[in-house]
Amino acid sequence: MHPLSEKVVAGDRRALARCLSVVEDRREGYLDILGDLYRRAGRGRIIGITGPPGAGKSTLVDKLIGAYREQNLTVAVAAVDPSSAFSGGAILGDRIRMQGRALDEGVFIRSMATRGHMGGLSGATGDALTVLDAAGFDVILVETVGVGQDEVDIVREADTVLVLLVPGMGDDIQVIKAGIMEIADVFVINKADRDGVDRVERELHSALTLAGEELAWTPPILKTVASRGEGVPELVAAVEKHREHLAASEEGRDRLLLKFTQKFSDLLAEGFLARLRERWLPPEEERRLLEAFVRREADPYTASDEILRRICWEVRP
Amino acid sequence: MHPLSEKVVAGDRRALARCLSVVEDRREGYLDILGDLYRRAGRGRIIGITGPPGAGKSTLVDKLIGAYREQNLTVAVAAVDPSSAFSGGAILGDRIRMQGRALDEGVFIRSMATRGHMGGLSGATGDALTVLDAAGFDVILVETVGVGQDEVDIVREADTVLVLLVPGMGDDIQVIKAGIMEIADVFVINKADRDGVDRVERELHSALTLAGEELAWTPPILKTVASRGEGVPELVAAVEKHREHLAASEEGRDRLLLKFTQKFSDLLAEGFLARLRERWLPPEEERRLLEAFVRREADPYTASDEILRRICWEVRP
């Protein structure tokens, strides 16, 4: 085992923070470390939390930390923000609410915003979750900002996905929600002391009825007022029930298979491109090609095909 | 040239629709077709339009079509919806508003929702834009639904990106906007007859001042009431000005280089994985590996590395 992996598995928190940076930045040795840690992961329960800004995700996460800590479970939080110079302030504000928890040794909070390598933010998040899992946390909460495809991909890395809604959102917001509806294992109507709860619940019910004949698991709809902790114990129970469902059915396994298929493809593609550029497609040649693309004298479709043919496909192992 | 490419270039509309399907579904011959068409593309001006649901994107697109048609320019519209069983209805409703235009021979409208292959929706959109461009349209409008990372990636395929905002959005929405702020070439405050226009404009100005010392192009802020066509001529002029800026500076070229670098990488990775699975990683072997990953007896990091080593990296061309 890599020395850093050993420390992480042994529960060294400073090593954990360093390890997460190594993995996020794809620094020397990160593949070896992930290989080590992957085999030791798989015990933590990973819970994804998504929903539109203002739905109260951070507040709910804070209460969930509290609930799991009362059960003597350790908790890691990965707060994932698609990086943006403009959004830094707002998101930082959210994070601060959780800082009180940082003094608790059973809690570990990490903000993540890395992008740019293959597999994008969701790939990097998946790797970070593997690290946190191998570090021995009982519960790992993944929280996203926003509601785009990126967020959908990120929370897909979780075993159980909570989708938060709030009453009083217009029809415009209903459209935003499209895409996150399908991934919900548990719906949470937060700020349930506001007007319009019944309407949201009715809409959810009809959407579920529409979609859900052949669902093995029907996502329950829970109501919370996270700021006052109302409904949090019921939510924790619903998450536990979903966990039992995954363990008892094929679905848990199928989900992992799907997740690892994607991961495996990303790793193969990422590794291939790195080797390709290192050995057969030096920067100056790639640059020449790209410039020919811009002038429309060559095209990336034909060029990529020619490169793939040339390099290695005559050989049989 | 592939027979379908020839027809597309010759202006055959039925061939164009068929070609777009071939490309979106990655059917037999699609790489050859894209290779043909890529070399004939590069003349159309591609304009991306994004912004939160309810900002009036479809209405504005309709007015832009009208304005360009008055200049005797032909217009293609690619309306891109991240596919979702839940959202189908709402999006269809939006599209219908444009249907009047479908009778005009100088207008071509295409809805796209394909996902699932490498490069995702933005990769597929980029290919479709190449097809529309090669088909000879003077103006190509790309409209997205929603405001996630996916939408950011999609409108990045455009030469000029319009970001729509509306007055009266709360702070919550400001957070959603994070990430689309950076990609705006032109800001459009639509529904500018509503209260709160000044506030949005002030916020935009201060965000731009904060970010923009070294910007070669400062995104102008325009106000429109798309439903009444107000501000549309000024918007068309601003787009034209941005186009001139791209042509006169290095930025147009740099953008294309960035876009084609991504495209080229996606194609290389996609082609590699297809060949890998066809020849060296039969489905049953991949399945065995994936099951070992689920049992944590193997890990995708080490396995992908071993496969890459084994296959082809001893050979030098």
Image: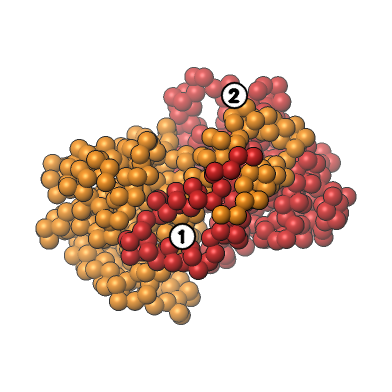
Chain colours: A orange, B red
Mark 2: few, some, or many residues within 10 Å (few <14, many ≥20)? some
Residue under numbered circle 1: A261
Residue at 34% of width from left, 76% of height from top?
A249
Mark 1: few, some, or many residues within 10 Å (few <14, many ≥20)? some
**Mark 1: which secondary structure?**
helix
**How far apart in space, not on screen, are marks 2 and 1 (Cα)?**
43 Å
Q: Amino acid at mark 1?
A: Thr
Q: Residue B154: x, y in percent? A: 59, 46
Subunit under mark 1 = A
**Mark 2: which secondary structure?**
loop
State the image quarter where residue A258 is shown. bottom left
Q: Residue furthest bottom?
A: A213
Q: Residue A178: x, y in percent? A: 48, 60
Q: Amino acid at mark 2?
A: Trp
Residue B205: mark: none
Q: Nearer the viewer, residue B244 or B104?
A: B244
The answer to whether residue B316 shows anywhere in this view is yes
The answer to whether residue B156 shows anywhere in this view is no
Q: Which quadrant: the C terminus of chain B? A: top right
Q: Nearer the viewer, residue A133 or B226?
A: A133
Residue at 53% of width from left, 35% of height from top?
A278
Residue at 42% of width from left, 33% of height from top?
A86
Residue under numbered circle 2: B217
State the image quarter where residue A24 is shown. top left
Q: Residue A41: x, y in percent? A: 28, 56
Would you say B122 lies left or right of B13 here? left
Q: Is residue B74 above or below residue A285?
A: below
Q: Nearer the viewer, residue A35 or B195?
A: A35
Subunit under mark 2 = B
Q: Is residue B240 above or below residue A214?
A: above
